[in-house]
Image (spheres, rainbow, N blue to C red):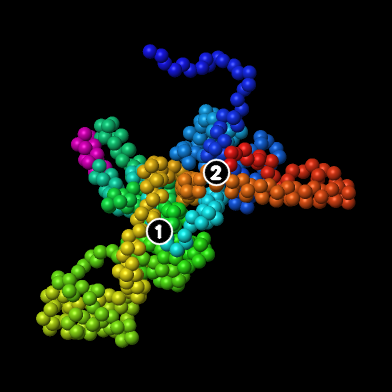
Amino acid sequence: MKYLQGQNREQTYLFPVSLNDAVDAENEVRLIDVFVNSLNLEDFGFRLDHIDNGRPAYHPSDLLKLYIYGYMNRVRSSRQLEKESKRNIEVMWLLKNLQPDHNTISNFRRDNPKAIKRVFRETVRIAQYFHLIGGTLLAGDSTKLRAQNSKKNNYNQKKIDRHQEYIENKLAEYEKALAENDGDNEEIKKGIKKQNQRKDNYKKLEQELKESGEPQLSTSDPESRHLITRNNITEVAYSAQTTVDAKNNIPIDYKITNTNDAKAMGEMLQRAKTILRSTNFTALYDKGYHTGSEFKIANELGIDVMVAIPTVAANAPNHKYNVENFVFDKEKDCYTCPEGEILTTNGRWHKAKTYRFKRYTTKACKRCKAKPECSAALCGKAIQRSEFQEYVDRNKNQIKENKELYRNRQQIVEHPYGTIKRQWGFNYIITKKGIQRASADFGFTMIAYNLRRLINIVGLKELGRYLVSIFSILCSRFAVFHLFLSQINQILKKTMNNPGIINQPLTGRNQSNITSPAMGF
Protein backbone atom coordinates (compact mmCIF):
# COMPACT_ATOMS: atom_id res chain seq x y z
CA MET A 1 0.00 0.00 0.00
CA LYS A 2 1.37 3.41 -0.99
CA TYR A 3 1.44 6.38 1.40
CA LEU A 4 2.04 10.05 0.78
CA GLN A 5 5.62 10.99 1.51
CA GLY A 6 6.70 14.32 2.97
CA GLN A 7 9.68 16.33 1.81
CA ASN A 8 13.18 15.79 3.08
CA ARG A 9 13.78 18.15 6.00
CA GLU A 10 17.37 18.70 4.84
CA GLN A 11 16.28 19.79 1.36
CA THR A 12 17.39 23.28 0.32
CA TYR A 13 15.67 25.38 -2.33
CA LEU A 14 17.12 27.30 -5.23
CA PHE A 15 14.23 29.79 -5.02
CA PRO A 16 13.50 30.37 -1.31
CA VAL A 17 9.92 31.18 -0.24
CA SER A 18 9.46 34.59 1.38
CA LEU A 19 7.11 35.21 4.31
CA ASN A 20 4.80 37.07 1.97
CA ASP A 21 4.62 34.08 -0.39
CA ALA A 22 3.84 31.78 2.55
CA VAL A 23 0.66 33.70 3.45
CA ASP A 24 -2.28 33.50 1.06
CA ALA A 25 -3.27 36.79 -0.61
CA GLU A 26 -6.78 36.55 0.87
CA ASN A 27 -5.76 35.39 4.34
CA GLU A 28 -7.63 37.34 7.03
CA VAL A 29 -4.33 38.12 8.75
CA ARG A 30 -3.77 40.63 5.94
CA LEU A 31 -7.06 42.28 6.86
CA ILE A 32 -5.89 42.63 10.48
CA ASP A 33 -2.69 44.23 9.17
CA VAL A 34 -4.44 46.84 7.04
CA PHE A 35 -7.13 47.45 9.70
CA VAL A 36 -4.51 48.48 12.26
CA ASN A 37 -2.55 50.43 9.64
CA SER A 38 -5.71 52.42 8.86
CA LEU A 39 -5.90 53.68 12.46
CA ASN A 40 -4.30 56.90 13.65
CA LEU A 41 -2.94 55.32 16.82
CA GLU A 42 -1.84 58.59 18.40
CA ASP A 43 -5.38 59.97 18.17
CA PHE A 44 -6.65 56.75 19.72
CA GLY A 45 -4.45 57.26 22.78
CA PHE A 46 -1.58 54.85 22.15
CA ARG A 47 1.78 56.26 23.15
CA LEU A 48 4.07 56.65 20.14
CA ASP A 49 6.76 58.76 21.76
CA HIS A 50 9.85 56.98 23.05
CA ILE A 51 13.21 57.83 24.55
CA ASP A 52 16.24 57.88 22.25
CA ASN A 53 18.47 56.02 24.70
CA GLY A 54 18.31 52.30 25.34
CA ARG A 55 16.83 49.47 23.33
CA PRO A 56 14.25 50.47 20.67
CA ALA A 57 10.64 49.85 21.69
CA TYR A 58 8.07 47.80 19.82
CA HIS A 59 5.67 49.92 17.80
CA PRO A 60 2.13 49.86 19.28
CA SER A 61 0.72 48.83 15.90
CA ASP A 62 2.67 45.55 16.02
CA LEU A 63 1.44 44.66 19.50
CA LEU A 64 -2.11 45.69 18.60
CA LYS A 65 -2.01 43.44 15.52
CA LEU A 66 -0.72 40.56 17.63
CA TYR A 67 -3.53 40.88 20.17
CA ILE A 68 -6.29 41.20 17.58
CA TYR A 69 -4.95 38.15 15.75
CA GLY A 70 -4.74 36.24 19.03
CA TYR A 71 -8.29 37.03 20.18
CA MET A 72 -9.71 36.25 16.73
CA ASN A 73 -8.01 32.86 16.97
CA ARG A 74 -8.90 32.17 20.63
CA VAL A 75 -5.45 32.93 22.05
CA ARG A 76 -5.45 35.47 24.90
CA SER A 77 -2.49 34.51 27.07
CA SER A 78 0.58 36.74 26.66
CA ARG A 79 2.85 33.71 27.06
CA GLN A 80 0.92 31.83 24.40
CA LEU A 81 1.10 34.84 22.07
CA GLU A 82 4.87 34.92 22.60
CA LYS A 83 5.02 31.28 21.45
CA GLU A 84 2.84 32.04 18.44
CA SER A 85 5.27 34.76 17.32
CA LYS A 86 8.01 32.11 17.09
CA ARG A 87 6.13 29.24 15.43
CA ASN A 88 3.05 30.60 13.63
CA ILE A 89 3.81 31.62 10.04
CA GLU A 90 0.84 34.02 9.99
CA VAL A 91 2.05 35.82 13.11
CA MET A 92 5.61 35.90 11.74
CA TRP A 93 4.25 37.64 8.63
CA LEU A 94 2.06 39.99 10.67
CA LEU A 95 4.90 41.09 12.96
CA LYS A 96 7.59 40.96 10.26
CA ASN A 97 9.42 38.31 12.32
CA LEU A 98 9.45 40.38 15.50
CA GLN A 99 9.29 38.26 18.66
CA PRO A 100 8.21 40.35 21.68
CA ASP A 101 8.44 38.66 25.08
CA HIS A 102 5.36 37.96 27.18
CA ASN A 103 6.02 40.85 29.59
CA THR A 104 6.03 43.37 26.74
CA ILE A 105 2.87 41.82 25.32
CA SER A 106 1.10 41.78 28.70
CA ASN A 107 2.11 45.35 29.57
CA PHE A 108 0.62 46.65 26.31
CA ARG A 109 -2.81 45.30 27.23
CA ARG A 110 -2.48 46.53 30.80
CA ASP A 111 -1.48 50.08 29.82
CA ASN A 112 -4.04 50.79 27.08
CA PRO A 113 -7.64 50.06 28.18
CA LYS A 114 -8.97 53.42 26.94
CA ALA A 115 -7.18 53.20 23.59
CA ILE A 116 -8.47 49.64 23.13
CA LYS A 117 -12.00 50.96 23.71
CA ARG A 118 -11.46 53.48 20.90
CA VAL A 119 -10.34 50.70 18.56
CA PHE A 120 -13.59 48.90 19.36
CA ARG A 121 -15.54 52.06 18.52
CA GLU A 122 -13.76 52.14 15.16
CA THR A 123 -15.23 48.69 14.39
CA VAL A 124 -18.66 50.14 15.19
CA ARG A 125 -17.97 53.09 12.88
CA ILE A 126 -17.02 50.70 10.06
CA ALA A 127 -20.24 48.76 10.65
CA GLN A 128 -22.16 52.03 10.39
CA TYR A 129 -20.40 52.85 7.12
CA PHE A 130 -21.64 49.56 5.64
CA HIS A 131 -25.17 50.24 7.02
CA LEU A 132 -24.99 47.24 9.37
CA ILE A 133 -26.26 49.28 12.35
CA GLY A 134 -30.02 49.86 12.25
CA GLY A 135 -30.06 52.24 15.20
CA THR A 136 -33.80 51.78 15.86
CA LEU A 137 -33.88 48.69 18.09
CA LEU A 138 -31.26 47.87 20.72
CA ALA A 139 -31.03 45.21 23.41
CA GLY A 140 -28.98 45.49 26.58
CA ASP A 141 -27.83 42.83 28.99
CA SER A 142 -24.86 41.74 31.06
CA THR A 143 -22.85 38.57 31.33
CA LYS A 144 -20.75 37.51 34.29
CA LEU A 145 -17.09 36.71 33.61
CA ARG A 146 -15.16 34.89 36.33
CA ALA A 147 -12.30 36.90 37.84
CA GLN A 148 -8.84 35.66 38.79
CA ASN A 149 -9.99 35.41 42.40
CA SER A 150 -11.36 32.29 44.07
CA LYS A 151 -14.40 32.23 46.35
CA LYS A 152 -12.03 31.24 49.13
CA ASN A 153 -10.21 34.57 48.79
CA ASN A 154 -13.38 36.66 48.86
CA TYR A 155 -14.60 37.88 52.25
CA ASN A 156 -17.53 39.73 53.79
CA GLN A 157 -18.15 40.50 57.46
CA LYS A 158 -20.32 37.43 57.94
CA LYS A 159 -17.63 35.12 56.57
CA ILE A 160 -14.92 36.76 58.70
CA ASP A 161 -17.11 36.43 61.82
CA ARG A 162 -17.66 32.75 61.07
CA HIS A 163 -13.91 32.10 60.77
CA GLN A 164 -13.14 34.09 63.92
CA GLU A 165 -15.73 32.11 65.87
CA TYR A 166 -14.18 28.85 64.64
CA ILE A 167 -10.68 30.04 65.66
CA GLU A 168 -11.86 31.04 69.15
CA ASN A 169 -13.45 27.61 69.63
CA LYS A 170 -10.25 25.86 68.49
CA LEU A 171 -8.14 27.99 70.83
CA ALA A 172 -10.45 27.12 73.72
CA GLU A 173 -10.08 23.41 72.91
CA TYR A 174 -6.29 23.71 72.74
CA GLU A 175 -6.12 25.63 76.04
CA LYS A 176 -8.21 22.97 77.72
CA ALA A 177 -6.08 20.16 76.28
CA LEU A 178 -2.90 21.99 77.28
CA ALA A 179 -4.12 22.36 80.87
CA GLU A 180 -4.88 18.64 81.03
CA ASN A 181 -1.34 17.85 79.79
CA ASP A 182 0.34 20.23 82.28
CA GLY A 183 1.55 22.45 79.41
CA ASP A 184 4.03 19.89 78.05
CA ASN A 185 2.47 18.98 74.66
CA GLU A 186 4.44 20.56 71.78
CA GLU A 187 1.80 19.63 69.17
CA ILE A 188 -0.85 21.58 71.07
CA LYS A 189 1.47 24.59 71.34
CA LYS A 190 2.03 24.48 67.55
CA GLY A 191 -1.74 24.35 67.05
CA ILE A 192 -2.24 27.39 69.31
CA LYS A 193 0.47 29.31 67.43
CA LYS A 194 -1.14 28.49 64.08
CA GLN A 195 -4.61 29.59 65.21
CA ASN A 196 -3.25 32.83 66.68
CA GLN A 197 -1.60 33.59 63.33
CA ARG A 198 -4.91 32.96 61.58
CA LYS A 199 -6.66 35.16 64.15
CA ASP A 200 -4.27 38.04 63.39
CA ASN A 201 -4.81 37.54 59.66
CA TYR A 202 -8.59 37.78 59.98
CA LYS A 203 -8.27 40.90 62.14
CA LYS A 204 -6.27 42.51 59.33
CA LEU A 205 -8.88 41.43 56.77
CA GLU A 206 -11.64 42.85 58.95
CA GLN A 207 -9.80 46.16 59.22
CA GLU A 208 -9.23 46.30 55.44
CA LEU A 209 -12.92 45.59 54.85
CA LYS A 210 -13.99 48.41 57.18
CA GLU A 211 -11.54 50.88 55.63
CA SER A 212 -12.68 50.03 52.09
CA GLY A 213 -16.31 50.84 52.88
CA GLU A 214 -17.33 47.96 50.60
CA PRO A 215 -19.49 44.97 51.57
CA GLN A 216 -16.89 42.56 50.13
CA LEU A 217 -13.12 42.18 50.00
CA SER A 218 -11.25 40.17 47.34
CA THR A 219 -7.58 39.56 48.05
CA SER A 220 -6.32 38.38 44.62
CA ASP A 221 -8.26 40.77 42.38
CA PRO A 222 -9.37 43.62 44.68
CA GLU A 223 -12.11 45.03 42.43
CA SER A 224 -13.83 41.72 41.65
CA ARG A 225 -17.03 40.89 43.52
CA HIS A 226 -19.11 37.88 44.51
CA LEU A 227 -21.99 38.03 42.00
CA ILE A 228 -24.91 35.78 41.09
CA THR A 229 -24.16 34.26 37.69
CA ARG A 230 -27.27 32.14 37.05
CA ASN A 231 -29.95 30.28 39.00
CA ASN A 232 -28.56 31.51 42.35
CA ILE A 233 -25.09 30.14 41.48
CA THR A 234 -22.45 32.64 42.58
CA GLU A 235 -18.92 33.35 41.39
CA VAL A 236 -16.30 35.99 42.11
CA ALA A 237 -16.64 37.81 38.83
CA TYR A 238 -17.00 40.97 36.80
CA SER A 239 -20.17 42.02 35.01
CA ALA A 240 -19.83 42.96 31.33
CA GLN A 241 -22.62 45.34 30.29
CA THR A 242 -23.25 45.39 26.53
CA THR A 243 -25.59 47.17 24.13
CA VAL A 244 -26.31 45.29 20.90
CA ASP A 245 -27.95 46.59 17.72
CA ALA A 246 -30.75 44.36 16.44
CA LYS A 247 -30.09 44.60 12.69
CA ASN A 248 -27.00 42.34 12.63
CA ASN A 249 -26.41 41.53 16.32
CA ILE A 250 -23.43 43.87 16.46
CA PRO A 251 -22.41 45.26 19.89
CA ILE A 252 -22.09 49.05 19.84
CA ASP A 253 -20.95 49.51 23.44
CA TYR A 254 -19.58 47.66 26.46
CA LYS A 255 -18.62 48.46 30.03
CA ILE A 256 -17.05 46.30 32.75
CA THR A 257 -18.51 46.73 36.25
CA ASN A 258 -18.52 44.82 39.54
CA THR A 259 -22.19 45.41 40.41
CA ASN A 260 -25.54 43.93 39.42
CA ASP A 261 -27.84 45.28 36.70
CA ALA A 262 -30.23 47.35 38.84
CA LYS A 263 -28.53 50.72 38.24
CA ALA A 264 -26.93 50.06 34.85
CA MET A 265 -29.65 50.91 32.30
CA GLY A 266 -29.60 54.71 32.54
CA GLU A 267 -25.87 55.07 31.90
CA MET A 268 -25.88 52.55 29.03
CA LEU A 269 -28.78 54.43 27.40
CA GLN A 270 -26.90 57.73 27.69
CA ARG A 271 -23.86 56.13 26.04
CA ALA A 272 -26.02 54.62 23.28
CA LYS A 273 -27.51 58.07 22.63
CA THR A 274 -24.00 59.49 22.22
CA ILE A 275 -22.86 56.68 19.91
CA LEU A 276 -25.94 56.77 17.66
CA ARG A 277 -26.38 60.56 17.97
CA SER A 278 -30.08 59.94 18.29
CA THR A 279 -32.79 59.06 20.79
CA ASN A 280 -35.09 57.62 18.15
CA PHE A 281 -34.67 54.01 19.22
CA THR A 282 -36.24 51.42 21.52
CA ALA A 283 -34.12 49.50 24.04
CA LEU A 284 -35.03 46.08 25.44
CA TYR A 285 -33.83 44.75 28.83
CA ASP A 286 -34.54 41.82 31.12
CA LYS A 287 -36.11 42.08 34.59
CA GLY A 288 -32.76 42.63 36.30
CA TYR A 289 -32.89 46.22 35.01
CA HIS A 290 -36.39 46.92 36.39
CA THR A 291 -35.61 49.94 38.60
CA GLY A 292 -37.87 52.99 38.92
CA SER A 293 -35.08 55.57 38.96
CA GLU A 294 -33.64 54.11 35.74
CA PHE A 295 -37.04 54.42 34.03
CA LYS A 296 -37.03 58.09 34.98
CA ILE A 297 -33.60 58.56 33.38
CA ALA A 298 -34.83 56.89 30.18
CA ASN A 299 -37.84 59.21 30.15
CA GLU A 300 -35.65 62.29 30.61
CA LEU A 301 -33.44 61.13 27.73
CA GLY A 302 -36.51 60.67 25.54
CA ILE A 303 -35.77 56.99 24.88
CA ASP A 304 -38.41 54.26 24.76
CA VAL A 305 -37.51 51.23 26.87
CA MET A 306 -39.15 47.89 27.51
CA VAL A 307 -38.02 46.00 30.60
CA ALA A 308 -39.40 42.63 31.65
CA ILE A 309 -41.73 42.86 34.65
CA PRO A 310 -40.55 40.94 37.74
CA THR A 311 -42.99 38.59 39.44
CA VAL A 312 -44.72 40.14 42.44
CA ALA A 313 -43.53 38.68 45.73
CA ALA A 314 -46.84 39.11 47.58
CA ASN A 315 -50.32 38.75 46.07
CA ALA A 316 -53.77 39.01 47.59
CA PRO A 317 -55.45 35.72 48.62
CA ASN A 318 -57.79 36.33 45.67
CA HIS A 319 -55.91 37.69 42.63
CA LYS A 320 -58.91 39.86 41.83
CA TYR A 321 -57.68 42.14 44.63
CA ASN A 322 -54.04 42.41 43.52
CA VAL A 323 -52.64 45.95 43.49
CA GLU A 324 -52.69 46.15 39.67
CA ASN A 325 -56.50 45.91 39.84
CA PHE A 326 -56.71 49.07 41.96
CA VAL A 327 -57.28 52.16 39.78
CA PHE A 328 -55.11 55.22 40.48
CA ASP A 329 -56.48 58.73 39.97
CA LYS A 330 -53.53 61.05 39.37
CA GLU A 331 -55.49 64.30 39.82
CA LYS A 332 -57.07 63.28 43.12
CA ASP A 333 -54.03 61.25 44.25
CA CYS A 334 -56.06 58.25 45.38
CA TYR A 335 -56.80 54.60 44.53
CA THR A 336 -60.18 52.98 43.92
CA CYS A 337 -60.40 49.31 44.91
CA PRO A 338 -62.43 46.64 43.02
CA GLU A 339 -65.21 47.09 45.62
CA GLY A 340 -65.44 50.82 44.88
CA GLU A 341 -63.80 52.08 48.09
CA ILE A 342 -61.33 55.01 47.97
CA LEU A 343 -57.80 54.64 49.38
CA THR A 344 -56.17 57.98 50.25
CA THR A 345 -52.81 59.21 51.51
CA ASN A 346 -51.83 61.77 54.10
CA GLY A 347 -49.25 63.10 51.60
CA ARG A 348 -46.25 62.08 53.64
CA TRP A 349 -43.25 60.59 51.82
CA HIS A 350 -41.67 57.51 53.40
CA LYS A 351 -38.11 56.38 52.68
CA ALA A 352 -37.21 52.96 51.35
CA LYS A 353 -33.63 51.88 50.60
CA THR A 354 -33.40 53.42 47.12
CA TYR A 355 -36.62 55.40 46.65
CA ARG A 356 -39.48 57.27 48.38
CA PHE A 357 -43.11 56.20 48.54
CA LYS A 358 -46.57 57.21 49.81
CA ARG A 359 -48.99 54.93 51.68
CA TYR A 360 -52.65 54.67 50.62
CA THR A 361 -55.25 53.22 53.03
CA THR A 362 -58.95 53.36 53.86
CA LYS A 363 -60.91 52.73 57.06
CA ALA A 364 -63.51 50.90 54.98
CA CYS A 365 -61.24 47.83 54.89
CA LYS A 366 -62.16 46.77 58.44
CA ARG A 367 -65.86 46.39 57.66
CA CYS A 368 -65.47 45.19 54.05
CA LYS A 369 -66.86 41.72 53.31
CA ALA A 370 -64.04 41.10 50.80
CA LYS A 371 -61.26 41.75 53.33
CA PRO A 372 -60.31 38.04 53.79
CA GLU A 373 -59.83 37.78 50.02
CA CYS A 374 -58.02 41.12 49.73
CA SER A 375 -55.55 41.34 52.62
CA ALA A 376 -54.40 39.34 55.63
CA ALA A 377 -53.27 42.49 57.47
CA LEU A 378 -55.31 43.45 60.54
CA CYS A 379 -55.68 47.06 59.40
CA GLY A 380 -56.57 46.08 55.86
CA LYS A 381 -55.02 46.92 52.50
CA ALA A 382 -52.11 49.38 52.38
CA ILE A 383 -50.65 50.33 48.99
CA GLN A 384 -47.15 51.76 48.70
CA ARG A 385 -46.80 53.97 45.62
CA SER A 386 -43.22 54.70 44.57
CA GLU A 387 -42.19 58.16 43.37
CA PHE A 388 -41.30 56.40 40.10
CA GLN A 389 -44.57 54.46 39.74
CA GLU A 390 -45.67 56.56 36.75
CA TYR A 391 -42.65 55.37 34.75
CA VAL A 392 -43.05 51.78 35.95
CA ASP A 393 -46.68 51.76 34.77
CA ARG A 394 -45.68 53.21 31.41
CA ASN A 395 -43.17 50.38 30.92
CA LYS A 396 -45.84 47.84 31.85
CA ASN A 397 -48.16 49.19 29.17
CA GLN A 398 -45.33 49.19 26.62
CA ILE A 399 -44.67 45.51 27.29
CA LYS A 400 -48.37 44.62 26.96
CA GLU A 401 -48.72 46.49 23.67
CA ASN A 402 -45.47 45.19 22.10
CA LYS A 403 -45.14 41.56 23.19
CA GLU A 404 -43.89 40.38 19.78
CA LEU A 405 -41.22 43.08 19.67
CA TYR A 406 -40.00 42.30 23.18
CA ARG A 407 -39.62 38.60 22.32
CA ASN A 408 -36.67 39.59 20.11
CA ARG A 409 -34.59 40.71 23.10
CA GLN A 410 -32.92 37.41 23.87
CA GLN A 411 -31.95 36.51 20.32
CA ILE A 412 -30.43 39.97 19.83
CA VAL A 413 -28.29 40.35 22.91
CA GLU A 414 -27.46 36.69 23.58
CA HIS A 415 -25.92 36.20 20.12
CA PRO A 416 -22.55 37.76 21.05
CA TYR A 417 -22.50 36.00 24.43
CA GLY A 418 -23.15 32.61 22.84
CA THR A 419 -20.28 33.10 20.42
CA ILE A 420 -17.83 34.53 22.95
CA LYS A 421 -18.50 32.21 25.87
CA ARG A 422 -19.64 28.94 24.27
CA GLN A 423 -17.82 28.88 20.95
CA TRP A 424 -14.65 30.75 21.88
CA GLY A 425 -14.53 29.70 25.55
CA PHE A 426 -13.96 33.27 26.80
CA ASN A 427 -16.03 32.84 29.99
CA TYR A 428 -13.49 34.36 32.37
CA ILE A 429 -11.29 37.46 32.64
CA ILE A 430 -7.68 36.57 31.93
CA THR A 431 -6.16 39.66 33.59
CA LYS A 432 -5.83 40.50 37.29
CA LYS A 433 -5.86 43.59 39.49
CA GLY A 434 -8.81 45.73 38.59
CA ILE A 435 -11.67 46.82 36.36
CA GLN A 436 -9.44 48.71 33.90
CA ARG A 437 -7.39 45.62 33.08
CA ALA A 438 -10.53 43.52 32.85
CA SER A 439 -11.93 46.14 30.47
CA ALA A 440 -8.87 45.81 28.21
CA ASP A 441 -9.32 42.03 28.06
CA PHE A 442 -13.03 42.26 27.25
CA GLY A 443 -12.36 45.11 24.83
CA PHE A 444 -10.14 42.90 22.68
CA THR A 445 -12.86 40.24 22.80
CA MET A 446 -15.40 42.74 21.48
CA ILE A 447 -13.01 43.94 18.76
CA ALA A 448 -12.46 40.35 17.63
CA TYR A 449 -16.20 39.65 17.64
CA ASN A 450 -17.07 42.75 15.60
CA LEU A 451 -14.30 42.13 13.07
CA ARG A 452 -15.51 38.56 12.70
CA ARG A 453 -19.06 39.82 12.09
CA LEU A 454 -17.80 42.35 9.55
CA ILE A 455 -15.85 39.68 7.66
CA ASN A 456 -18.83 37.30 7.65
CA ILE A 457 -21.37 39.91 6.53
CA VAL A 458 -19.42 42.32 4.31
CA GLY A 459 -16.88 39.83 3.03
CA LEU A 460 -13.10 39.82 3.24
CA LYS A 461 -12.48 41.47 -0.14
CA GLU A 462 -15.01 44.29 0.20
CA LEU A 463 -13.92 45.08 3.75
CA GLY A 464 -10.27 44.93 2.73
CA ARG A 465 -10.79 47.36 -0.17
CA TYR A 466 -12.46 49.85 2.17
CA LEU A 467 -9.65 49.63 4.73
CA VAL A 468 -7.01 50.02 2.01
CA SER A 469 -8.73 53.24 0.90
CA ILE A 470 -8.68 54.55 4.49
CA PHE A 471 -5.02 53.56 4.78
CA SER A 472 -4.21 55.46 1.57
CA ILE A 473 -5.91 58.60 2.89
CA LEU A 474 -4.00 58.30 6.16
CA CYS A 475 -0.69 57.91 4.32
CA SER A 476 -1.36 60.98 2.16
CA ARG A 477 -2.09 63.03 5.28
CA PHE A 478 1.18 61.95 6.86
CA ALA A 479 3.03 62.74 3.64
CA VAL A 480 1.66 66.29 3.70
CA PHE A 481 2.51 66.57 7.39
CA HIS A 482 6.06 65.31 6.70
CA LEU A 483 6.48 67.85 3.89
CA PHE A 484 5.24 70.63 6.16
CA LEU A 485 7.77 69.69 8.88
CA SER A 486 10.57 69.51 6.32
CA GLN A 487 9.77 73.02 5.11
CA ILE A 488 9.67 74.33 8.68
CA ASN A 489 13.03 72.69 9.37
CA GLN A 490 14.53 74.30 6.27
CA ILE A 491 13.32 77.74 7.40
CA LEU A 492 14.68 77.18 10.90
CA LYS A 493 17.98 76.00 9.46
CA LYS A 494 18.40 79.20 7.50
CA THR A 495 17.12 81.65 10.09
CA MET A 496 18.41 80.10 13.30
CA ASN A 497 21.51 78.37 11.98
CA ASN A 498 20.37 75.17 13.64
CA PRO A 499 21.06 72.31 11.24
CA GLY A 500 20.47 69.70 13.94
CA ILE A 501 16.73 70.26 13.86
CA ILE A 502 16.36 68.82 10.40
CA ASN A 503 17.74 65.52 11.61
CA GLN A 504 15.24 65.21 14.44
CA PRO A 505 12.67 62.42 14.02
CA LEU A 506 9.02 63.21 13.54
CA THR A 507 6.87 63.44 16.64
CA GLY A 508 4.32 60.84 17.71
CA ARG A 509 3.06 60.78 14.13
CA ASN A 510 6.15 58.89 12.98
CA GLN A 511 4.70 56.21 10.75
CA SER A 512 7.96 54.46 9.84
CA ASN A 513 6.51 51.22 11.13
CA ILE A 514 3.64 51.25 8.62
CA THR A 515 4.16 49.65 5.24
CA SER A 516 1.83 49.60 2.29
CA PRO A 517 -0.63 46.70 2.47
CA ALA A 518 0.07 43.66 0.31
CA MET A 519 -3.43 42.30 -0.09
CA GLY A 520 -5.36 40.54 -2.79
CA PHE A 521 -8.36 42.87 -2.53
Image coordinates of residue 254 in percent, x first then y, are 46, 54
Amino acid type indicated by mark 1 = Gly
The single residue placed furthest to the bottom in the displayed view is 332
- Asked if residue 178 is positioned above or below residue 314 in the image, the reply reads above
Quarter of the image with the N terminus is top left
Residue on which the image places disc 2:
461
- SS of the residue under disc 2: helix
Which residue appears at 51% of the width and 56% of the height?
A: 131
- Asked if residue 514 is positioned above or below residue 310 in the image, the reply reads above
Which residue appears at 41% of the width and 65% of the height?
A: 282
Amino acid type indicated by mark 2 = Lys
Q: On the picture, is 310 further left or further right than 479?
A: left
Magenta: main secondary structure: helix
**In magenta stretch: residue 158:** no
Q: CA distance from mark 1 to mark 2?
A: 32 Å
Disc 1 or disc 2, which is closer to the eye? Answer: 2
Mark 1: give few (<14), some (14-19) or many (20+) Cα within 10 Å: many
Q: Which residues are magenta?
A: 171-182
Image coordinates of residue 168 in percent, x first then y, are 27, 46
Residue on which the image places disc 1:
140
Q: Earlier in the sequence, mark 1 or mark 2?
A: 1
Which residue appears at 65% of the width and 45% of the height?
A: 48
